[in-house]
Every structure is written in structure tokens, then in C-alpha cells.
Amino acid sequence: MGIDNTAGNEDNGRASEQAPSIRLLFSALLLVMLLAALDQTIVSTALPTIVGEFGGLENLSWVVTAYLLASTIVVPLYGKFGDLFGRKIVLQIAIVVFLLGSVLCGLAQNMTQLILMRALQGLGGGGLLVVTMAVVGDVIPPADRGRYQGLFGGVFGLATVIGPLIGGLLVQHFSWRWIFYINLPLGVFALSVIGAVFQSRVSRVKHQIDYLGAAYLASALTCIILFTSQGGTVMAWSDGQLWCILAFGLVSLGGFIYEERLASEPIIPLGLFRNRTFVLCSLIGFIIGMSLFGSVTFLPLYLQVVKDSTPSQAGMQLLPLMGGIMISSIVSGRLISKRGKYRIFPIIGTLCALAGMILLGTLTNSTPVHQLYLYISLLGLGLGMVMQVMILAAQNSVEPQHMGVATSSATLFRSIGGSIGVAVFGAIFTNVLHSRLAVLLPEGAQLPRSLGAAGVHHLPAALQQDYLQAFGGAIHSVYQIAAWVMVLACALTWLLKDVPLRQK
């Protein structure tokens, strides 16, 4: 008995010694996650100003899509690089690439340069997300991971709270370029903290990197997103080049699947798709990413153009959405750690998000702002109960040796959904806006170069009302379609089963 007690005391001592280092490490990881999440939200309130300076309304969605697409493509590669070279050095490189892209975005002189530099930024941003999640999977057992995943969701919520607000303040009082420069002090601080407290594991796993699979995936995603974003805007639906792009994308997708069957270490092992929980988590994550990024991107536009909000006011008016995400993510994470069950939260979450989307689909130019607050807070509460829970469920459903690839794959599908969602809903918005303007405005009417309120207010009074009516109708269509997409996610959550959370 004495020996047993001594051993127990030694274990308790080691645990108490490790606790401060784990907390310090986790604080550093939260900082890195904030760096990545902030850049996905801070840009939205600046889009009207950027388009006003550079033009290119038809390429508006690509300012967001380029970042999401690039980060999506590199997500599975960063997981392997972390195992091969150590997570610390890979995470530091990702931060440096992200900061370099941020500086170059701020120096961009036209829309093409900005889109290309956003892609460079995404190459670093994808690593921030997946390496951070992999480290949590290494050091935190699944039974306790819900609480930590909830905090990560809270960071996303915090980023979505302060991102539009900071973005609006910078655009209004300085320049839109500062939405990228602001990453520098935060990034440098993150690098210093990680260098001081992050002790990467010594053992490294030899990997064969599936570069051919990554090339096929990049080609397929790029072509599919080009098809969805350019069709009906830059290219007519009858244009043969547009359909050649889609055909090339489908061929690349077939090549990716074939390569994954042959590769010794595929980016996405096809055997994972025999795991029911993994498949459902991937599909739900894809739909959530598509709905979230595809629809929320247009809220600042609606607030600035229709409600005449300043960029900073538009950021403040998104607080209910972001607060909902943060609160429900933290609360659901703690309840999952306490109860050991997670299935009910995605069900409730998708129902809340669906209700929020349906209500947003009823927006008109005369809808009071306080009603909008109610609608978006409901949407945020729903999304917070789904996003991080899907990662936890995917990690818990596979064997420990496959946890890293399951994490990166589940993150990959959500990122793919976001990339496609921004492109699809951007194309829907642009097409509906142009078609409504063609009906409402007289032939030869001069449209504003900027999407901002200032450009709209320079229109004659009669044209201004017609433009706002068309703009509101386009937003209306985006959320109606997003609601139908969310119906599918809601149906899929009922097929999930509670798998007991592992203790190790």
C-alpha cells in the first residue's frame, strides 16, 4: 500500500509540475489561433472601401476566396511537415509566411496584386490553424479536449467580435491597408512566446509527402472555384472556356482520388471514408464552412450600403453574431467535457443556425437594426455549437495514430466549404444584383464604382432607391439559398452517434 501511495504521489507531482507548462503552451496556441482567425474577419468591413479604390466588383469575393483556397490546399501538408520536422519550427515558418503576406497585401496597388498576396497570406494561415490543432491533439486527451476546443471556439468568436470592429476603425480613421499591417505586432509577439514556451516533441516521424496529390487537389479546387465565381459574371454561361475549366477541375478531382489510392501516405486516406462519424463530420463541416463564410461576408456590405453604417459601426453591429459564437462554443465545450457526450450540440446548433438563416432571408431595406441583431445572435449561437465539436468528434472516432490526418482532413473539408461558399454566394450576389439593376435602372445609367454608402449616395435620388432595392434583393437571395444549404447540415447531424470520449 505504501508503494502504491508513493507512486500515486509521484504521478500527482508530475501532473502538478506539467500543469503550468501546459497552460502556458495553451496560451501561446490561443494567441496563434487568434492571429489566424482575426485575418478571416477583419477584412470583411474593408471590402467596400477596397473595391471603391481598385474597382473590380466582379472579383470582390476573391479577396476572401484567395486566402481560404490557399490555406485549404496546404492544410494536409502542414500536418505531415509537423510530424517530419517538428511542430515548433513548422509553426514558426507558417507565422513568418503569414506576416510576409500581410505586409505585401498592405502594399498592393491593384486588385490582382491584392488577391495574389492574399493567397500568399493563406499559405501561412493554413499552417497556423492545423499545427495548432495538432499540438492540442498531442497533449490533451479526448475526454478533456472538449473544454479546450470550446476555448478555441471562443477565440474564433473573439476574433469575429474584434475583427470587424478593428477593421472598421482602421478603415474609417486610417487606411484599409492597416487591416493587414495590424498583424505584424501580434505575429511578432506570437513568435516570441512560441520560441520561449513551446517545447516540440523530440521524436519525429518519417513521412513521404504526397506532393502529386496536393497538386491534383489544388488544381481541382482552383478550377471548381473559378467556375462558380466567374460563371455569369466575368464569363457568360455559354462560354466554352468556362466549361473547359470545370471539365479540367473534374479531371483533376478524379486524378486526386486515383492518386490517393496509390500513395503510400495519402493526403486523405480513402479508408477514413469507411468511418461513419468521420464522413458525417466532414460533410457537416463542409456545409457549415460554406454557409458561414459564404453568407456572413455580405453582412458588413448590407449594413454599410443599406443601413448607411460607417465601417466601424458595421463592425460593432456584428457583435451579437460573434458573441453568440463565443458563448455557445465555450459553454458547449465545457458541457461535453463534463458529460462525455457531444451529439446533441450539433443538432441544436444547426437548428439554431437554420432559424437564423431563414430570418436573415427576410431582411428588407426597412428591417430595423434591432431585428438584425436578434437574427445574427441566433445564427452565432448555432454555429458555436457545431464548428469545434465536429473536430472533436472526428478526432475521437479514429485510432490515435490517425488522429493527425483526421484532424487535418476535417479542417480541410470545412475550409473547402468556406472557399466554395464565398465563391458561390459571391456569384449569386453579383448575378442577382446585376439582373435586378438591369430591370430597375434605365438604360445607360451610371452605376457607382464603389460598393460603399458614399458611392451610392452620389446617385440621383430615384436611381439611389432603385439601386438599394436591387442590393437588398441580392442579399435576400443569398440568405434564402444559405438556409436551404443549412437544412442539409441539420439533417446530417441526426445521423451522428455518440462515441465515448477516450481518456488517452
Image: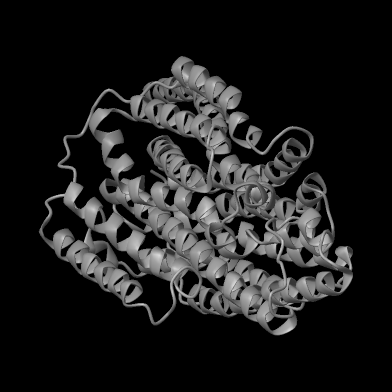
277 in relation to 54, above or below: below
Total residue callouts: 0
Q: Quadrant of residue 428?
A: bottom right
Q: Quadrant of residue 351?
A: bottom right
Front residue of this view, candidates 178 and 111: 111
Residue lying farthest top?
196
Residue 412 location (% of width, % of height): 39, 55
**What residue is rendered at 54% in x and 38% in y?**
109
Quadrant for the N terminus in the image = top left
Q: Quadrant of residue 308?
A: bottom right
311 in relation to 483, above or below: above
Snapshot colouring:
one colour
**What residue is rendered at 82% in x and 69% in y?**
464
Q: Is residue 150 visible?
A: yes
Residue 396 location (% of width, % of height): 40, 54
Front residue of this view, candidates 455 and 119: 455
Front residue of this view, candidates 322 and 27: 322
Q: Is residue 390 left or right of residue 180?
A: left
**What residue is rendered at 34% in x and 45% in y?**
74
Front residue of this view, candidates 328 and 177: 177
**What residue is rendered at 47% in x and 15% in y?**
196
Q: Is residue 187 left or right of residue 78?
A: right
Residue 71 location (% of width, % of height): 41, 47
Quadrant for the C terminus in the image = top left
Residue 99 location (% of width, % of height): 49, 29
222 in relation to 209, above or below: below
Residue lying farthest front?
444
180 in relation to 450, above or below: above
Q: Is residue 497 visible?
A: no
